[in-house]
Image: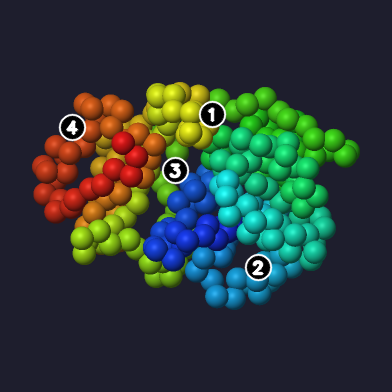
Amino acid sequence: MPEILLIQPNIGIHDFLATRFPDPLLAIASVPYMRGYKVKILDQRVEKNFKQLLEQEIRKKPLCIAMPVMTGGQILRALEISKFIRSIDKDIKIVWGGPHPTLFPVQVLENENIDIVVTGEGEITFFELVEALSKNTPLSAVKGISYKEDGHIKTNPERELIKDLDELPPIPYDLIDTSKYNPTYISGRKAFTLLTSRGCPYRCTFCFATAYYNFTWRGYSVDRTMEMIHQAVDKFGAQTILFQEDNFATSIPRCNEIFDRIIADGLDITFSLVGI
């Protein structure tokens, strides 16, 4: 199978505070990787020779090159990367996903260096897109994307939200060199970021999650969450867990059960809620 190249563009000042694992890219990689595709992750934040490495990967002619993009300075870096890719190979499909393309898919596709936008949750959509590109089948059958065809921008029906997060594969941390990342330390304790739920039921007008998740909330099961916590502690030496999600405490019974399990398992960790 051809290789899929995933790129993490620089974010900005936060990259200098702590360089965490590229969680969104790892999530997107999980399904194609599980299904046998070769996935390469190239992180602009940690690679000193990023441009040289990127050119090497482009010349291997990957099936597609995809990157997550947030509104703000990351757009500029993603545009620079997309233009560089196009200057070397005009045929490789360039895919954007994440918050900004989800909110403004047509605007993004008006740029000549972007071919396809994945909107909303990307794991299933991106895998189906990869399958379509690999088998050269019509993109019109892939829910949750916008794309260019015959000079026109086309938007497919939205993808339904994933009902059971536990059905998603484990995060493939082996796709990155974890030694290149600079973890966060809170009160001297090594912190590790986890995403154990998605969405929020509230209607804050400033938050992208309202459009992204349509006022819904879903959490991994307590068992799956505990597997993630144990991996963070046992494999990566986490002493503090950063629950980096929109609203971890939406389900109080779930929260209580997770905390009870942490105590019962004898885990010497603290935690922080990046969202509420």
Q: Residue at x 35, y 34 (%)?
A: 247
Whole-number angstrom distance, CA of label 1 to CA of label 4: 29 Å
Disc 3 to disc 2, how far (Cα)? 27 Å
The residue under label 3 is: 169
Please tell me which residue is depicted at 31% across the width and 28% down the height of the picture.
Answer: 250
**Residue tagged 2:** 54
Q: Residue at x 15, y 51 (%)?
A: 267
Where 110 falls versus 80 (above or below)? above
Residues packed near mark 3 inside 10 Å, few (<14), some (14 to 19) or many (20 plus)? some
Residue 70 point in image, percent of width and height: 56, 47
Tell me residue 117's x, y (percent).
68, 41
Q: Which residue is mark 4?
A: 256
Q: Quadrant of residue 119?
A: top right
Q: Identify the secondary structure beneath mark 1.
A: helix
Give amino acid for label 2. Leu
Circle 3: residue type:
Pro
| Mark 3 residue element | loop
